[in-house]
Amino acid sequence: MKRKAYAKVNLSLDVLGRKENGYHLLSMIMQCIDLYDTIEIKEINNGIKVNCNKINIPTDKRNLAYRAADMFIEKYKINKGVEIYIEKNIPTEAGLGGGSSNAAIVLKMMRDMFKPQINDEELAMLGEKLGADVPFFIYGGTALCEGIGEIITPLEKFKNHILLLVKPNFGVSTKDVYEEIDKITINDHPNMNRILNYINENNLEDLSKNMINVLELVTLDKYPELLEIKRDMKNLGSIGTLMSGSGSTIFGFFENYQFAERCYNFMKDKYDEVFLSKTI
């Protein structure tokens, strides 16, 4: 069994507060894009084996795909094991949700392989124990994500919009960014109702001009290179740029492929991980 595990970008991200357990209360609009890892699973007699095409990716219990399979087997008392192969294309520590997407797709494949009667809602509740982004990837597409990220409201699909992603040669610790955001007064919050309207209208231009990710207050201040990427994208025709998640990826929307390709060629001279993509 082989499936695609898609990356995501945040079309907006707001931090509304912090719970006693340390988790932050969020309001985000998440969007799947056609950059993906490929996950292959086959049944074995027992145990869990994970292999990956990238040597820097852990293949033990530190890997979310491993933990997803382990959790599924334990919860549903499956008397078989699985071997998982991950062909990794989504950059790590990038704000693109690669690990969470892998975990969600493994849960869906395990369901199809062993317990087909489980619905998405039950699978999402299981995924929440692995990470706050996992429930979104159970549903995919375009969604408003609230709470710690686990309350999912599917939205009109915001499909086929061209974007360019640039992941600079460093990653960002999500934990560190959220610790720093608590020390900052956030004055400029995204207008979620307005952004939701633009998505419903399929209005790329106005959406692009109104995207806000409050975590940029931390990450862009710490890494000025990201501001430079945003400036270059705008100068090369992007109608709106944003950092995805806690970083370090910057993405920009383009109204036509020609401008996006020109920006891609410029960025590819400076950075290893540059991707032309579209919303799905």
Image: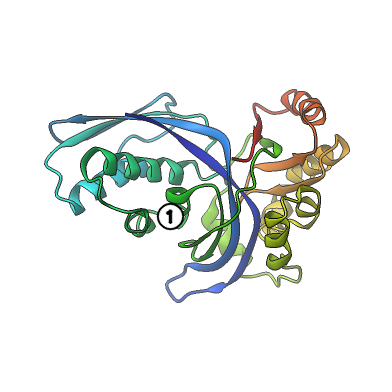
The x and y percentages for residue 214 are 68, 61
Residue 128 lies in quadrant: bottom left
Residue 34 lies in quadrant: top right
* Residue named by callout 1: 135
Q: Which quarter of the figure is the C terminus placed in? A: top right
Extreme-right residue of the structure: 235
Which residue occupies the foreground of this view, 160 or 67? 160
Reply above or below: 101 against 120: above
Which residue occupies the foreground of this view, 135 or 53? 135
Q: How is the image coloured?
A: rainbow
The x and y percentages for residue 147 are 50, 68
Looking at the rendered structure, the kind of residue marked 1 is Pro
- Left or right of 169? Residue 187 is right
**Residue 35 appears in the picture as rendered:** yes
Q: Secondary structure at mark 1?
A: helix
Q: Residue at x 68, y 55 (%)?
A: 199
